[in-house]
Image (cartoon, helix red, strand yellow):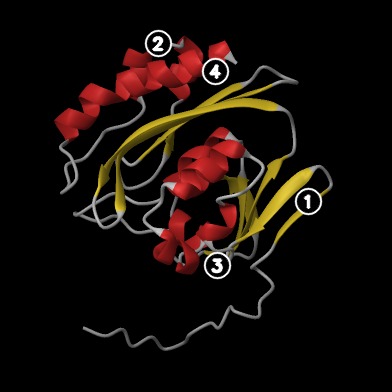
């Protein structure tokens, strides 16, 4: 049926549709279209954006909408979560209790009900990045599984994340510590949907993690 909300927010003039650099950070407004990221200088972010759905969808879909995409039985969404987690991005949101800023992985794992994303930010530092994934091509591009990694040049910190395997992107903390691809099962529990089975995702995830780690080490 049709939605009948008591209130509606018109955000098209809220100033949330820009990308800027300030204070050593890149700040992306929640209303920025996904299509605006396809030529972003951070390649892993641009590469992920290019593979989301198709150009028509990307022109209408927003960064905030992609991060907050609800769970579905037909396909998993929220592809941008993985590169943003790998980049150490933070979400600024508002809602009950006022504004708060938190890591993307914490925002996705927590209670997002009633929260409005305002912007996403990450530090402008030198990094090596890599991304591996499998997608099912159709009228749109549906993710079966993806793994994104990043290593900061100043701290050598490794961050890994997976998306497309469950309701939200998740940080692969156990794998970050062990560097063992088989440990990915300790960080994520894949689901069944119309795109792929949980068993298939469990089988390919260690391979994607290994490929992402190998690419990081070779750069």
Judged left or right of residue 158, residue 202 is left
Label 2 – label 4 distance at C-alpha: 14 Å
Nearer to us of marks 2 and 4 is 4
Q: Circles 2 and 3: CB distance less than 8 Å?
A: no
Location of residue 186 (image quadrant):
top left
Q: Nearer the viewer, mark 1 or mark 3?
A: 1
Vertical relation: 124 (above or below) 67? above
Which residue position holds label 3? 96
Identify the mark at residue 216; answer none if there is no mark: 4
The span from disc 1 to disc 4 (Cα, nearest Å) is: 26 Å
Residue of label 2: 180
- Decide: few, some or many residues near mark 3? Use Cα within 10 Å; few <14, some 14-19, many ≥20: few
Please tell me in which quadrant of the rendered image residue 198 appears. Answer: top left
Asked if residue 84 shows in the view, the reply is no
N-terminal of the pair, mark 2 or mark 1, is 1
Q: Residue at x 54, y 63 (%)?
A: 33
Q: Quadrant of the C terminus?
A: top right
**Which residue lies at the image location 34% right of the left edge and 59% below the top edge?**
70
Residue pictured at 46% horizontal, 65% vertical: 61
Which badge, 3 or 4, comes first in the chain's sequence? 3
Count the marks: how many? 4
Is label 3 or label 4 in front? 4
Quickly name the residue at label 1. Answer: 21
Residue 173, position as x, y percentages in the image = 47, 24
């Amino acid at each position: 049926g049709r939605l009948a909300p008591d209130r509606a927010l018109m955000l098209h003039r809220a100033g949330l549709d820009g990308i800027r650099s300030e204070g050593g950070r890149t700040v992306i407004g929640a209303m920025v279209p996904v299509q605006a990221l396809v030529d972003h200088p951070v390649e892993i972010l641009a590469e992920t954006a290019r593979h989301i759905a198709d150009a028509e969808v990307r022109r209408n879909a927003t960064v905030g909408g992609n991060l907050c995409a609800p769970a579905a039985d037909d396909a998993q969404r929220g592809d941008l979560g993985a590169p943003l987690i790998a980049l150490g991005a933070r979400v600024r949101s508002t809602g009950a209790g006022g504004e708060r800023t938190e890591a993307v992985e914490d925002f996705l794992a927590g209670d997002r009900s009633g929260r409005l994303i305002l912007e996403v930010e990450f530090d402008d530092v030198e990094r090596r990045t890599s991304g591996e994934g499998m997608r099912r091509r159709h009228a749109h591009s549906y993710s079966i599984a993806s793994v994104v990694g990043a290593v900061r040049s100043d701290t050598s910190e490794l961050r890994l994340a997976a998306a497309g395997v469950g309701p939200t992107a998740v940080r692969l903390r156990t794998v970050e510590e062990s560097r063992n691809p088989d440990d990915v099962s300790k960080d994520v529990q894949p689901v069944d949907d119309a795109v792929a089975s949980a068993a298939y995702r469990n089988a390919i995830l260690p391979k994607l993690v290994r490929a992402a780690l190998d690419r990081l080490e070779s750069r």
